[in-house]
Each structure stands twice: as structure tokens, then as C-alpha cells.
Image (tube, rainbow, N blue to C red):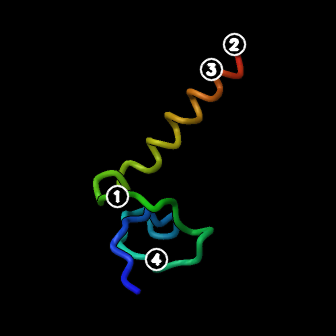
Amino acid sequence: MADDQWYYCLKHNRAEQGKQHWFAEVMGPYPDKATAERALDIVRERNRAADQKDGD
């Protein structure tokens, strides 16, 4: 079964295609490499939005 989706590997700090690591070591899946490379920024943006919502 081929996995052509992209993941951000927390172990290697880079975007990688396919499930190469244990689920706790990756973030994703993402539709493409560019989005996977932004994984940490996406998490920061989501956390900031959730914190602002909690503050309302």
C-alpha cells in the first residue's frame, strides 16, 4: 500500500513522504511537501487562535 502523503518528521525536523516513522514522531498527513514543511507554523497558528478564543 503506497502512501504518497507528506508528514513532518519531528525526529529529523523535515518533511518526508510516506509513513516512515512511529506515529508519535510525525505530524500529518499533509497534501504536499510545502504544507508539511509548514507544519510547525500551522500548529503555532492554530494554538494562537485557540488561545485567543479561550480568552473571549
Q: CA distance from mark 3 to mark 2?
A: 7 Å
Q: CA distance from mark 4 to mark 3?
A: 33 Å
Name the front one of labels 2 and 1: 1
2 or 1: tag closer to the N-terminus: 1
Residue 31: assigned label: 1
Amino acid type indicated by mark 2: Asp
- Judging by the rendered image, the residue that carries numbered circle 4 is 19
- Judging by the rendered image, the residue that carries numbered circle 3 is 52
Amino acid type indicated by mark 3: Gln
Q: CA distance from mark 1 to mark 3?
A: 27 Å
Residue 11: assigned label: none
Within 10 Å of disc 4 (Cα), the crowding (few <14, some 14-19, many 20+) is some
Q: Nearer the viewer, residue 5 or 22?
A: 5
Amino acid type indicated by mark 1: Pro
The residue shown at (62%, 29%) is: 50
Q: CA distance from mark 2 to mark 1?
A: 32 Å
Task: From the top left corner, tell me how far across and down residue 47 is, in percent.
Answer: 59, 35
Q: Is residue 42 above or below residue 2?
A: above
Within 10 Å of disc 1 (Cα), the crowding (few <14, some 14-19, many 20+) is few
